[in-house]
Image (cartoon, rainbow, N blue to C red):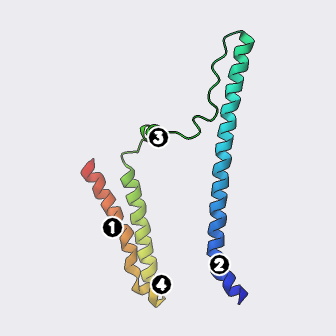
C-alpha cells in the first residue's frame, strides 16, 4: 500500500524539486548580479580617490534591483518572425502527437488521436497571423 501512495505522489515530488531548483538558481543569479554591480561601484570610487577626482555620488544600492514596468516594456523587443517559429514547433509537435496516438495499439489512444490536431491548427493560425500582419 505504501508503494502505491508513493507512486501517486511521485509527480508532485518531482515537480516540487524542479520548481525549487529553478527558484534557487534564479536567486543565485540575482545575487551574483548584485554583487558584481557593488564591486564595480566600489572600484569606481577607489579609482576616483586615487586620482584625486571628486568621487561620484554614492548610488542607492537597492535601487535598480527591480526594473520598472515602463523600462521593461521599452527594452522588450519581439522578433517580427516569432509566429513562424512558434507555428512550426506547434505543427511538428501536433503531427507527431497525432501519429503517435493513431499508431498506438491501445484503444484509448486510438480514440483520442485527434487531440494532436489542436496544436497543428494553432500552428497554422500562427502562420496565417504572420502572413496577414507582415
Q: Earlier in the sequence, mark 4 or mark 3?
A: 3
Contact between labelled residues 1 and 2, with CB atoms less than 8 Å apart = no
- Disc 4: which residue: 104
Q: Is residue 106 above or below residue 52?
A: below
Counting residues from the start of the chain, the first of labels 2 and 1 encountered is 2
Q: Quadrant of the N terminus?
A: bottom right
Q: Secondary structure beneath disc 3? A: helix
Viewer-side residue, 98 vs 2: 2
Looking at marks 1 and 4 on the same chain, the residue that comes earlier in the sequence is marked by 4
Which residue is labeled 2 in the image? 9
Tell me the CA gap for discs 2 and 4: 27 Å
**Foreground: disc 4 or disc 3:** 3
Question: What residue is pinned by disc 1?
Answer: 121
Which residue sits furthest top? 52
Query: Disc 1 and disc 3: Cα gap in Å?
Result: 32 Å
Label 1 vs 3, first from the N-terminus = 3
Where residue 100 sits in the image (x, y, percent)? Answer: 46, 78
At horizontal 69% and vertical 15% (from top left) the residue drawn is: 48
Q: Are marks 1 and 3 in contact (CB under 8 Å)?
A: no
* Secondary structure of the residue carrying numbered label 1: helix
- Are the two marked residues, 2 and 3, in contact with CB atoms closer than 8 angstroms? no
Amino acid at each position: 500500500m505504501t508503494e502505491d501512495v508513493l507512486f501517486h505522489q511521485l509527480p508532485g515530488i518531482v515537480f516540487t524539486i524542479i520548481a525549487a531548483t529553478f527558484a534557487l538558481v534564479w536567486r543565485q543569479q540575482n545575487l551574483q548580479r548584485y554583487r558584481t554591480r557593488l564591486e564595480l561601484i566600489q572600484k569606481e570610487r577607489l579609482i576616483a580617490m586615487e586620482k584625486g577626482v571628486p568621487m561620484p555620488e554614492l548610488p542607492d544600492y537597492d535601487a535598480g534591483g527591480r526594473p520598472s514596468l515602463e523600462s521593461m516594456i521599452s527594452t522588450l523587443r519581439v522578433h517580427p518572425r516569432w509566429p513562424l517559429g512558434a507555428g512550426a514547433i506547434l505543427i511538428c509537435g501536433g503531427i507527431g502527437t497525432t501519429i503517435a496516438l493513431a499508431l498506438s495499439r491501445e484503444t484509448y489512444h486510438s480514440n483520442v488521436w485527434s487531440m494532436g490536431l489542436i496544436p497543428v491548427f494553432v500552428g497554422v493560425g500562427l502562420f496565417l497571423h504572420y502572413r496577414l500582419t507582415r
